[in-house]
Image: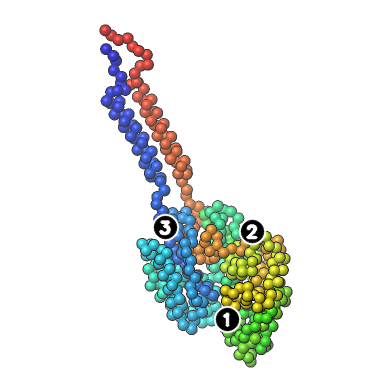
Amino acid sequence: MKEKNPWHTPVTIIITVIGVIAIVALVTVAVLQNMPLLQKYKYGIVLDAGSSHTSLYIYEWPAEKDNNTGRVEQKHSCTVDGPGISSYASAPPKAGESLRACMREAEEWVPKKRHHETPLYLGATAGMRLLDMENKVVSDKVFEAVKGALEKSPFSYQGARLLKGQEEGAFGWVTVNYLDDRLKQGLETTGALDLGGASTQISFVSDNYDGSESPSNSVTFRLYGNDYTLYTHSFLCYGKDQAQRIRLAEHTQSGPKIVADPCSHPGYSETKKYSVLYDSPCVSDRKPQGAPETFDHTGTGNFQECQEVVKKVFNFTKCKYSQCSFNGVFQPILQGPFGAFSAYYFVMDFLNLTDTSITLEDVKEKLKLYCATPWSQIVQQHPKTKPKYLAEYCFSGTYILTLLIDGYNFTSVSYSDIRFIKKIKGSDAGWTLGYMLNLTNMIPAEAPDTPPLPYAGYVSIVTIIAVLIFILFLVSVRPLWPHCSKQQQIV
């Protein structure tokens, strides 16, 4: 009679089947548990109420990575029709009404089920700072009108407020370095140069600055486990539009009827009102007594002379610190690359001067040729650009160059470290993203925890362990295996 094979006994078969099922279940659960889920997103909305216009930005990030590792990206932007909210000083309710079209766009772009949880912020910058200085009662009325309009939206309204110049500069720096992934990786940071209509900001990290000299220009951040001491300063009245007013105020101190302007093209001529020119806190105290109602603004188109006129906008003589930029403001030695955005980009892009390979001397030569171009030819070359804006590019380009070289102390060498940028990885450069990241705590002070193993590595290790368990199981039932050698049958 043959000896029974123990492997074929019911108990052995049951144990084997259970073991195989357990291993398959282990691997299946591990894989399913760690499979990427269908992505869900959260949203945030920030309105940038600048001096010349208001823009709305919608940001999006993965919902399951909220408050630590979620990558925030710009989903959509909308430019509000009309001027900045500070321009509605004589009719504050219209400031709120102007936002409606862009708010309707936001309702379409953000999924309806996310409306109630989407934070909505409005930050007002230099235009409203000037209005607040000039007439706080009117400024408050404009904010009330804006608040009333935004509270009617389906979003989670978080307030409208006046940003300090230092905040505007610091949040612009955060935006640029966040989008470039320099903060999370602890890389050398990029300085931020922001130019608006009414103010300009410079922000950067310098090894020579610890915040002790001129502490008012210091902001300290701890981001992703790294400490940053940031130098930042905002110059109110030194945005390109207000600087233009200051320059023309210098020209019109004697109240002339004709102003020959080297920063305007030859053949340019426009009649302007003294009351409009001096209608700003930046120049209101300089208005000449007994000036006529209007003056004829004519162009001569001379870049070198324009430079000399623009330099008079700045004060380079006063400095009580170890070193200054202008107007007696402390500034440490420039360090690292810089990103120049907002009006820096738009002006230099129009003038075809954003290429980093263009030397400073080439920029000056191109501006010289551009400013000398007759006004009729300029209008013919740019038929779609409004003459009001077209007439300002010679001055704006010259002002930017003078601000960077004479104001901030860039040299012919360090000028090549400036990158003129509009967007970084699809998101607009500016203070709005940094502002929202700060208010929503999307950048942790400490580096976020990460799994010890990547997903693929984790699944591989689990699979190997499961196979090992199966092998050990087979070895454990070795005594039940049939003998390899044939035994003699008993008759």
Q: Position of residue 438 (x, y in %)?
A: 49, 62
- SS type, badge 3: strand
Numbered label attached to residue 436 = none
Lateral position of residue 220 relative to residue 265, left or right: left
What residue sits right under mark 2 in the picture?
A: 336
What residue sits right under mark 1 in the picture?
A: 281
> Residue at the spot x=35%, y=24% of the render?
477
Q: Residues within 10 Å of mark 2 (few under 14, many from 20)?
A: some
Q: Relative to 80, is 90 above or below?
A: below
What residue sits right under mark 3 in the picture?
A: 41
Q: Relative to 225, is 130 above or below?
A: below
Q: Locate the N terminus and report the quarter of the image it occupies.
A: top left
Q: Position of residue 367 (x, y in %)?
A: 69, 70
The answer to the question of whether label 2 and label 3 lie on touching residues, with beta carbons closer than 8 A, is no
Q: Nearer the viewer, residue 450 or 267?
A: 267
The answer to the question of whether label 2 and label 1 lie on touching residues, with beta carbons closer than 8 A, is no
> Residue at the spot x=37%, y=26% of the render?
474
Looking at the image, the residue that sits furthest to the bottom is 290
> Residue at the spot x=65%, y=61% of the render?
356
Q: Relative to 135, is 152 above or below?
A: above
Amino acid residing under circle 1: Pro
Q: Relative to 200, is 254 above or below?
A: below
Q: Residues within 10 Å of mark 1 (few under 14, many from 20)?
A: some
Amino acid residing under circle 3: Tyr
Is residue 438 shown to the viewer in this render? no
- SS type, badge 1: loop
> Residue at the spot x=64%, y=66% of the render?
352
Q: Quadrant of residue 17?
A: top left
Amino acid residing under circle 2: Gly
| Earlier residue among tags 1 and 3 | 3
Q: Nearer the viewer, residue 74 or 322?
A: 74
